[in-house]
Image (cartoon, rainbow, N blue to C red):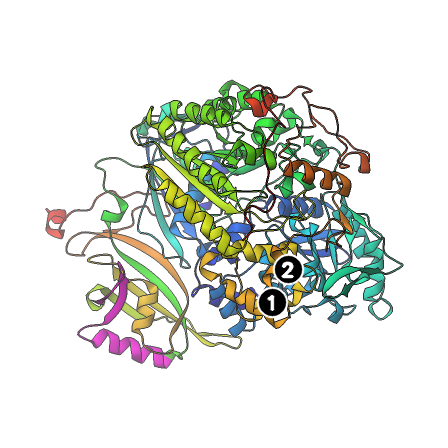
Amino acid sequence: MSDAHLDAGRAATGVLELPERLRLRYRKLGKVRFTSQRDLARLMERAMRRASLPLRRSAGFSPRPLLSFGLALPTGCSSLAEYLDLRLDEASATSPEVRVVASTEVDFTHLARLCAILSSMLPAGIDVTAAATLHGPEVSLQEAVASCDWELEVLGVGPAEAAGRVERLLGADAVMVTRERKGREVADDLRPSILSLRVADRPARVLDGLGDVVGIEASVTTRPRGVRPGELCRALGDQVTLLGACRTHQWMENEDRTVRAEPLSEAGVACVGLPARTEVLGG
Amino acid sequence: MTSVWDRVEPLLWHVEKPARYIGGEDGSFADDKGPEAVRWLLAYPDTYEIGLPNQGLQILYGILNERDDAAAERTYAPWSDMEAAMRAARVPLFSVESARPADEFDVLAFNLSAELTYTNVLNMLDLAEVPLRTAQRGAGDTVVLAGGHCTYNPEPLADFLDAIVLGDGEEVVGELNDVMAAWLATPEPGRSRRDLHVALARTEGVYVPSLYTPRYVAGRLAGYDVDPAAPETIDKRTVADLGQWPYPRAQLVPLTEVVHDRLNVEVFRGCTRGCRFCQAGMITRPVRERPKDQVIDMVRKGIERTGYDEVALTSLSTADFSGIGEVVAALTDPAQGVPQVAVSLPSLRVDAFTVATAASIQQVRRTGLTFAPEGGTWRMRRVINKLISDDDLYSAVDAAFSQGWRRVKLYFLIGLPTERDEDVVAIARLAANCVERGRAHHQKASVTASVGGFVPKANTPFQWHEMDSPNELRRKVSLLRNEARATRGLEIRWHDPDATAAEGIVSRGDRRIGAVIERVWRDGGTFQEWSERFELARWEAALAAEGLDLATTALRARGRDEMLPWSHLSAGLHPDFLWGDYEASLAAEGVEDCRWTPCYDCGACTTYGIEHVVASTSPPAGGSQGTGQGLDLTGPVTVELGATRR
């Protein structure tokens, strides 16, 4: 949401009115990126309790709030585009200051205010940048997101050497990496998951005593399996070590990858479904 | 101020749980003080997730940072992977708040809550690049302090610490800050470490080991040569009124999971149940309750501020808190303006009344309930003065299972004074009877009996008593396991007897143990309280290299006239009281709780001119442990001293 919207949200007073189904978009930057996905879930839950959000809870012996996170962000990576869906329920209300209303009645200012409240209650580095009402069929974020864009910072080789290695990687038939799964080493081919890979245009910086820092931009699919920044870095060969990685976008795409959209743009526009194919869109 | 964050950051990709090293907790302090403020680095010598919740450290952190002339940050023991990465990259120990190197702080103050962390203390000093031994430190080096329950025998660490605080830290920490500020105000060429040591030694409750030189005769400690500038004995500090210290005001809320990850509110300090094995109960007397309205207020504000949905009311025996009924009622009544929270009572008294209280507040999660009968027979429990009858336990367990709990955990000690095999075997029978009672309510009722090895600690009535060897403890554990085997639903767990032995070395040893700790640390023995990292062989080799052994340093009995390493350090308890209570224990005579019965002059109140602060003058309702009724405290019980010696 724009700064003007967020400012208006911050200034708003009175009862906070929210819809039953919501999507949030947030950033995770700075030191706090070293928290795990599990830590993040707990931080969100605590912030939401402090904000008196009437979270709908699961049934059962030990009820948990119904929060559904998208793709896990690897510990240590930062992000400009993380998402979280949640459900509210008037019956769970703990404060007269927060009400759950029919989604058509929710004003944009209330959503901006929610962003401002949550950001103020979350640790430095986690900012909720947009919120939107969800309509229509329920599709989980994990199912919906088809690809991600990353910016990596690597150490160990200069920009020219890095560019050469990128070239070779893209030209290879297969890029094998091994990883441990259920205690066994398994080999996977990363190549089909790499949509694009390039050395960033911005000039490399030099880190005191550690040498050149080279930026790499990558776009990778989430299926059949996600690609972690650490794996991309290893695929670039010896001496290359990862200094930092930032997820810049998550994309929902149609089947032929001709139409794509963010699950929730920073402007606050949510997307819950895309046409399966371009022709359908045209017709 | 420098920060090593730029050098720390690249390491964090390659270590487990990097959030241990980033700080950022809600409630943490950002240094905005002037250059004249004394800089404290408060250190907990274990991992972040164990150390962060420590309330003692958080209390001092809050008190110091409220002062204009003090600034406190925190640090924890880096796990081995991080330690290796730090050493390889030549990154020193640093604070989690600002990644400031440890040796830039004026004071490095350790919380000593568990003896097996001592090798971590040395490792952290080494990583801090502070000279290891006090004798090697100059006027410009960081001053190393320690406080916490373990300081009642600080001798094993004495060579590494400039000063040690005995007792409650709330008041003395400010006095220490004044001493430090005055010393630091003297320009470096003109000030000496000795001046500081003398000034510290003049502060009540502060022990400066360099001013006490141990004397040994025939391999035994014979006494201390005390510097004329230092007092002969050091008495602990005691805060008279807990109500004046509502700390921590802003409990730290960590970004990553820690133990006891909930709001903690201390409802009273001290305990006069008089359990003879319990060092915490002996050294924290008298009982000082927090006013119940303050408890409710601290919970209400804490829950609002932190977003936690659970609060623990902490103390050594929370069911004994006079205001427990009203506090629980207030916290579970939504009309009182406290958001719905789960309330936990970490240490339950063993009786049905207590279970009813627990049931009234744990409406949602009924996973398990824990009781600590400690001894298997009534005779054993009279010896240790844990005055609960078998019926108390059975009624508590009945109440628990009938109220919906499925699992009950029981804590026991083995290796207790006068213990016979029948006392050990009785643990399994008692626990089996509890399982049987549970079965009346649930098909799958289960009981876990956790068994720890007893270490006689400083400033308790058992401080003179011998302790069981690891082999003897192992024999008792196997007796117990054999006896328990037939009972379905009964699980026996036990603490590693080797670790108990090492705890004995560092709890009971004298200053010569410092060199042993150093050897164990240099041999790679960090994180000794983590079972996968512990090996007794390391300790035995270190003892041997110093011409010492396990039997004489840890296991053996001490005579009444023997110079104990902690003879000059007092928790207020008269040695005559302790000896008398020891003799009573050997005669299996119990003593009642002096909160509600006449004083028997242990010294904790009279020495310091203070008294119990208890809102209720009558004992709580409940079983015999509450009222003391119907208990035969003396009577003919045959005690054979040394019956278990082998």
- Against B14, residue B562 (above or below) is above
Name the amino acid type tagged 2. Answer: Thr
Q: Give me the disc on residue B543.
A: 1
Where disc 2 sits, the SS reads helix
Horizontal placement of B275 versus B609: left or right?
left
Q: Nearer the viewer, residue B7 or B119?
A: B119
Q: Quadrant of residue B137?
A: bottom right
Identify the chain of the residue marked 1, using the numbered disc in the image.
B
Q: Nearer the viewer, residue B521 or B388?
A: B388
Horizontal placement of B282 versus B16: left or right?
right
Horizontal placement of B191 versus A137: left or right?
right
Report if the CB atoms under discs 2 and 1 are less than 8 Å apart: yes
Mark 2 or mark 1, which has the lower sequence index?
1
Q: Are marks 2 and 1 on the same chain?
A: yes
- Against B392, residue A3 (above or below) is below
Whether residue B284 is visible, yes or no, is no
Q: Residue A121: x and y, percent?
A: 50, 41
Identify the chain of the residue marked 2, using the numbered disc in the image.
B
Q: Quadrant of residue B240?
A: top right
Range of residues picked out in magenta = A160-189
Q: Nearer the viewer, residue B258 or B73?
A: B258
Whether residue B69 is visible, yes or no, is yes
Q: Residue B129: x and y, percent?
A: 64, 69
What is the CA distance from the residue labelled 2 to the residue labelled 1?
9 Å
Query: In what quadrant of the picture does the N terminus of chain B appear?
Result: bottom right
Name the amino acid type tagged 1. Answer: Leu
* Residue marked by disc 2: B553
Q: Residue at x 15, y 56 (%)?
A: A256
